[in-house]
C-alpha cells in the first residue's frame, strides 16, 4: 500500500502537469481538474490508514475498491484531456504494470480487464460526443470514432499486462518454492529441537540439506572442544580416514562468519575437505557458530549445478538453518555434559552419605566422651568457685580478726601510753625534756593514725554497709593521692558479698599500682553491668609501659599476679592495654549468675583518657573456666 500510494501520487502529478500545460485540448477547467485530482489523492492517501484499522477480510475489499477507483480516475483524466488521442491514456498501462508488480499477476490481469472496460466506456462516450471533445479525427462510427483504430489502443495495455504477469508468475513460483523449502526446514528444525542425543543432530541436518536443496555430497565436521571430528557423511561408500591438518576455507569461514563458495577444493590448502569430498565442485562451506562466535565446526556440501551457480536465497536459508542447528547441537552437548556431571554428583553424593554415616558414628562417640569431660570440667569449675568463696571468706575473716586485734590490743595500749606521756609532761618543766616528750607524743599519735588507716584497709565498713561504689570512693579519698579521680557507677544491683569483695580488692590493687608507678594526673573508674556479670574499667593517663605477651608480675612484685588469679578463680577475664607515654587501661569482668563471655577488645561503654592514634598492645591476663551449656 505504501508503494502503491507513491505510484498514485506520481499519476496525479502527471495529470495536473499535462492538464495545466495543454489547456486547448482539455474540456474541463483547471479548477475542476485540480479539485477532482485532489479528492482522488486524498482518498488514495487515506486508504492505507483505513486498511490498518480493518479486519483482514474487510481490508481486502477496501484495497480492491481503491484499485477500481484508480481506473475510474485515470479513465476520466484520459477522457477530459483528449479522449483516445490523449497522451494520458498510457497511464492505464502504467497502472496495470504497477498493480501486477506490487500485488500479484492475478490481480494485475483483473485490473487489466477493468481498465479495458473503462477505456471502451471512454471510447463510446467520445463516439456519442458526451460531452464534445476537441481534436477528434473523423470516424466511421456515429460521433466520428473508428472502433478498430481505438480498439488497437488496448493491444499495448494487454501486452504489457501479459509480460508483467508472466514475470510476476515466475517470481511467485520461486517464492512458493522458497516457502516450501522454508516449511520443510522448519519441520526439520522442530525435529532437531526434539532430539536429545548430539550424535543424531549432524546426520539429520546433513540429510535435510541434501534433500531440500538437492546437494549431492556433504560432510559435517564438529567437536565441542579440541580438534574437529567427522560427525556426519553423505556420499558414495564409507567415509575415508580424516587426515591431519587445517583447511584454509574453514578458517576463512570462521573468521568472516559467513558461508564460503569454492569452485573446487585444493588438496594442499584444504586437505581434510578434499579427502572427504574428492573431486568436488561448487562446494558451499558454512561455519557452525554459536554465541560470541564460538566455533563448533563446519558444514560442507556440494551443489550439483553444472553452471557452478547457487542462488543467493539458497545460501541465506542454508546459513540460517545451519546456525539454528549449531545452537541445537551445542545445547545437546551441554545437556550430555550436564548428565555426566549429574552422574558424577550422584556418585559423590553416595560416597558423601557413606562418609557422613561414618562421621556421625565418630561424632557420637566423641560427643559422649566430650560430655563426660564437660561434666568433669563443670564439677571442677564448681569446686573452684566454692574454693574461691572459701578463700574470700577466709581472707576477709582473717582481715576482720587482724583488724579487731589491732583495735583491741595495740591501739588501746598505744593510746594508754599516749595518756601516760601526757600526764608525765604535766610534771616536767625542763624545756629540753618537754621538747623530747612532744616529739614522742607526735610519734605515738602518728602510729595510732596509721593503725586506724590499716584497720580501714583491712576491712572497709562502707563495703558492707553502702556497697562497692561508695567503698571505692572512700578509698580514693582516703589515700590522698596526687592524681585527680572520677568514679562512675552504673551498677543497677549490688554484686553478691563474695564478688563485691573480689571486685574491690582487684580495683584496690590496680589503684595501688597507679599510685606507685604510673605518675598519673587523672584516673577514671567505671563500674557497670555487662553480659550477666560485672565489669570494672580503670584508666589512667600515666607514663604507661610496653605490655608483654604474657602478663605477669615483675620480679619481687605480686600485685598483677594476684589480680589475675583472683579474676580467673571467679571464672572471669582480665585485660591490660598500655603504650609507653600513653597511659594504661585495666579492665576485668567476673560473672554474676550468667555464663562467662569471651573478653573483647573494648567494652560496650568506653571510659578512657583520650590518646593519640597508634598501634597499642592488648594482653589478656587469663581466661577463666569453661562455659558449660546444656
Image (spheres, rainbow, N blue to C red):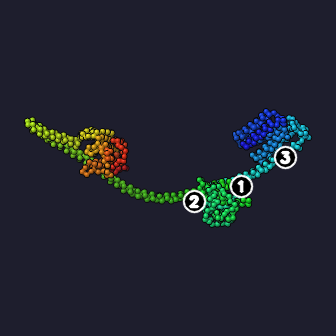
User: How far apart in space, not on screen, are marks 1 and 3 (Cα)?
Assistant: 36 Å
Under circle 2, the secondary element is loop
Residue at image mark 2: 225
Pointer 3 local density, CA inside 10 Å: few below 14, some 14–19, many at least 20: few
Measured as percent of width and height from the top left, residue 508 is found at 26, 44
Residue placed most toward the observer, 287 or 43 = 287
Mark 3–mark 2 contact, CB under 8 Å? no
User: How far apart in space, not on screen, are marks 3 and 2 (Cα)?
Assistant: 68 Å
Residue at image mark 1: 311
Can you see residue 65? Answer: no
Determine which quarter of the picture holds residue 2: top right
- For residue 155, which numbered disc appears in the image? 3
For the point 90% across and 40% down, the residue is 139
Residue placed most toward the observer, 603 or 554 = 554
User: How far apart in space, not on screen, are marks 1 and 2 (Cα)?
Assistant: 33 Å
Earlier in the chain: of badge 1 and badge 2, it is: 2
Can you see residue 524? Answer: yes
Measured as percent of width and height from the top left, residue 343 is found at 53, 59
For the point 61% across and 65% down, the residue is 244
- For residue 494, which numbered disc appears in the image? none
Q: Is residue 465 left or right of residue 280?
A: left
Earlier in the chain: of badge 3 and badge 2, it is: 3
Q: Quadrant of the N terminus?
A: top right
For the point 28% across and 48% down, the residue is 560
Amino acid at each position: 500500500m505504501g508503494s502503491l500510494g507513491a505510484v498514485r501520487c506520481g499519476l496525479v502529478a502527471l495529470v495536473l502537469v499535462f492538464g495545466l500545460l495543454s489547456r486547448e485540448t482539455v474540456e474541463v477547467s483547471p479548477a475542476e481538474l485540480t479539485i477532482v485530482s485532489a479528492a482522488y489523492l486524498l482518498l488514495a492517501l487515506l486508504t492505507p490508514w483505513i486498511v490498518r484499522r480493518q479486519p483482514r477480510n474487510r481490508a481486502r475489499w477496501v484495497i480492491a475498491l481503491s484499485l477500481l477507483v484508480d481506473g475510474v480516475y485515470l479513465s476520466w483524466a484520459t477522457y477530459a484531456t483528449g479522449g483516445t488521442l490523449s497522451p494520458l491514456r498510457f497511464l492505464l498501462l502504467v497502472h496495470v504494470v504497477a498493480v501486477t508488480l506490487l500485488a500479484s499477476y492475478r490481480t494485475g490481469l483483473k485490473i487489466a480487464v477493468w481498465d479495458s472496460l473503462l477505456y471502451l466506456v471512454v471510447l463510446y462516450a467520445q463516439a456519442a460526443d458526451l460531452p464534445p471533445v476537441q481534436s477528434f479525427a473523423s470516424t466511421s462510427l456515429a460521433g466520428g470514432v473508428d472502433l478498430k483504430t481505438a480498439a488497437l489502443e488496448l493491444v499495448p495495455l494487454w501486452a504489457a499486462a501479459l509480460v508483467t504477469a508472466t514475470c510476476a508468475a515466475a517470481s511467485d513460483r520461486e517464492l512458493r518454492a522458497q516457502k516450501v523449502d522454508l516449511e520443510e526446514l522448519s519441520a526439520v528444525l522442530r525435529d532437531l529441537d526434539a532430539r536429545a542425543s548430539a550424535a543424531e543432530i549432524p546426520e539429520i541436518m546433513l540429510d535435510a540439506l541434501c534433500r531440500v536443496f538437492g546437494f549431492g555430497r556433504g560432510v559435517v565436521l564438529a567437536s565441542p572442544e579440541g580438534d574437529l571430528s567427522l560427525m556426519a557423511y553423505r556420499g558414495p561408500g564409507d567415509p575415508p580416514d580424516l587426515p591431519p591438518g587445517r583447511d584454509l576455507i574453514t578458517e576463512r569461514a570462521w573468521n568472516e562468519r559467513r558461508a564460503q563458495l569454492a569452485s573446487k577444493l585444493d588438496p594442499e590448502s584444504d586437505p581434510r575437505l578434499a579427502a572427504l569430498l574428492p573431486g568436488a565442485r561448487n562446494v558451499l562451506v558454512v561455519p557452525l557458530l554459536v554465541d560470541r562466535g564460538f566455533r563448533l565446526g563446519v558444514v560442507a556440501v556440494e551443489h550439483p549445478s553444472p553452471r557452478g551457480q547457487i542462488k543467493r536465497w539458497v545460501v541465506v536459508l542454508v546459513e540460517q538453518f545451519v546456525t539454528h542447528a549449531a545452537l541445537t547441537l551445542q545445547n545437546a552437548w551441554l545437556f550430555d555434559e550436564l548428565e555426566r556431571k549429574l552422574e558424577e554428583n550422584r556418585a559423590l553424593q553416595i560416597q558423601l552419605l557413606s562418609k557422613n554415616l561414618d562421621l556421625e558414628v565418630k561424632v557420637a562417640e566423641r560427643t559422649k566422651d566430650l560430655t563426660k569431660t564437660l561434666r568433669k570440667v563443670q564439677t571442677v569449675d564448681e569446686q573452684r568457685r566454692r574454693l574461691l568463696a572459701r578463700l574470700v571468706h577466709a581472707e576477709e575473716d582473717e582481715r576482720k580478726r587482724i583488724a579487731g586485734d589491732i583495735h583491741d590490743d595495740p591501739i588501746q595500749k598505744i593510746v594508754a601510753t599516749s595518756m601516760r606521756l601526757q600526764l608525765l609532761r604535766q610534771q616536767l618543766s625542763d624545756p629540753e625534756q618537754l621538747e623530747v616528750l612532744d616529739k614522742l607524743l607526735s610519734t605515738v599519735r602518728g602510729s595510732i593514725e596509721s593503725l586506724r588507716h590499716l584497720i580501714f584497709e583491712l576491712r572497709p565498713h562502707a563495703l558492707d554497709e553502702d556497697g562497692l561504689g561508695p567503698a571505692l570512693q572512700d578509698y580514693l579519698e582516703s589515700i590522698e593521692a596526687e592524681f585527680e579521680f572520677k568514679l562512675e557507677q552504673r551498677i543497677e544491683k549490688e554484686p553478691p558479698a563474695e564478688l563485691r569483695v573480689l571486685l574491690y580488692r582487684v580495683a584496690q590493687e590496680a589503684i595501688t599500682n597507679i599510685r606507685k608507678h604510673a605518675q598519673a594526673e587523672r584516673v577514671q573508674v567505671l563500674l557497670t553491668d555487662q553480659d550477666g556479670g560485672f565489669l570494672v574499667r580503670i584508666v589512667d593517663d600515666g607514663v604507661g609501659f610496653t605490655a608483654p605477651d604474657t602478663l605477669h608480675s615483675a620480679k619481687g612484685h605480686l600485685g598483677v599476679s594476684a589480680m589475675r588469679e583472683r579474676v580467673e578463680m571467679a571464672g572471669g577475664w582480665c585485660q591490660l592495654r598500655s603504650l609507653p607515654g600513653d597511659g594504661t587501661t585495666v579492665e576485668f569482668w567476673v560473672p554474676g549468675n550468667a555464663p562467662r563471655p569471651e573478653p573483647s577488645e573494648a567494652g560496650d561503654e568506653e571510659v578512657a583518657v583520650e590518646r593519640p592514634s597508634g598501634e597499642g598492645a592488648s594482653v589478656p591476663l587469663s581466661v577463666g573456666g569453661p562455659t558449660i551449656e546444656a
